[in-house]
Image (spheres, rainbow, N blue to C red):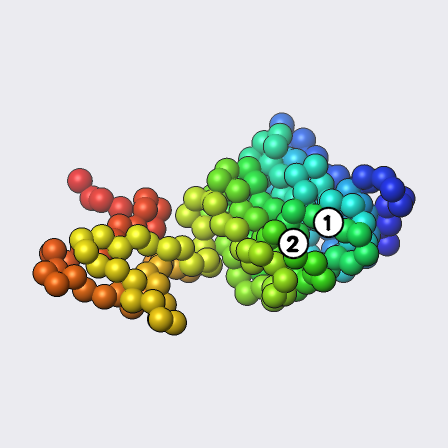
Amino acid sequence: VFRGSSGTSRIGVYLYISDTSGVASHAMITENNFDCPGGAVVVPRGRNVKVNYNNIELSEGTGSGSGAIIDIDGSSGVIPWAEVTGNHLGTFGTANPDSMIRVNGAAGVTVDKNTILTAFSTRAAIFITNSANDTDIGFNEIGTTFVTPVDDQGDKTMGTFRAITPVGGWSNTGGGYETLKYFKSRDGIVTVVGVLTAPATPNGVGLGTLPLGYRPEKIV
């Protein structure tokens, strides 16, 4: 059981793995109970870190310095292949984090099978920053009180839908129909969905443009 002192910003586990030899990795933080104002787990540097099957209930504070409860931060070096799996995260009392799980400065992180709940209007359940790449977002149970369930600003993220802006006179139909968007699965397959309204004179066959990392590579 990790419980931070009331009125402080104490962190449950602050993990900095010095891997100058290239072999330090696979720290496992599992089956614990956390209530720490400064966040449950903060990782500024590491490899293959596993944060699995913990019960995390924040009763006060704003979490880590970046406002998260589980913070795969990568501020001191890119973190490859971390896992945040099977955890329960909840807030109550006066807790006010910006996000519940944050992925930053990391590559190939898996966020899967977590239950993420809050009684408050919290900005994001999962926050993927623009310095994270190839993040794999699996099936997570996310409560309805989050402003944005998954704020995905990362590169080549798998498991989240992103909007495509229609071009050539095409437009989203609206009225409850799906807008044009794309989704990349963990096996690399990209799916495009949506219902569009055609212009009076369709301009070629182009509907929109997929960004790099979400389309086949050009073979020269």
Q: Quadrant of residue 120?
A: bottom right
Q: Residue at x 47, y 45 (%)?
A: 154
Q: Name the kind of residue labelled 1 in the image.
A: Asn
Residue at image x 68%, y 42%? Answer: 67
Taking the view exactly as shown, the residue that stands out farthest to the bottom is: 176
Q: Kindly tell me whether residue 125 is visible in this rendering.
A: yes
Which residue is at the front of the view, 182 or 166?
166
Is residue 169 shown left or right of residue 135? left
Residue at position x 34%, y 67% in the image: 174
The x and y percentages for residue 161 are 42, 58
Q: Quadrant of the N terminus?
A: bottom right
- The label shown at residue 96 is 1
Q: Residue furthest top?
A: 20
Q: Which residue is mark 2?
A: 122
Residue 114 lies, in percent from the top left, at 64, 62
Are dots 1 and 2 in contact, CB under 8 Å? yes
Residue 140 lies left or right of residue 14; in this view the side is left
Residue at the far right in the pictured view: 5
Q: Left or right: where does residue 145 sit relative to residue 169?
A: right
Residue at figure coordinates x 18%, y 53% from the top left: 168
Q: Is residue 88 above or below residue 5?
A: below
Give the left or right position of residue 129, taking residue 25 as reference: left
Between 93 and 56, which is closer to the camera in this rendering? 93
Question: What amino acid does circle 2 point to?
Answer: Thr
> With respect to residue 198, does 94 lie above or below?
above
Residue 135, percent from left and from top: 50, 50
Residue 104 location, x and y as percent?
Answer: 57, 40
Which tag, 1 or 2, sits closer to the chain's start?
1
| Quadrant placement of the C terminus | top left
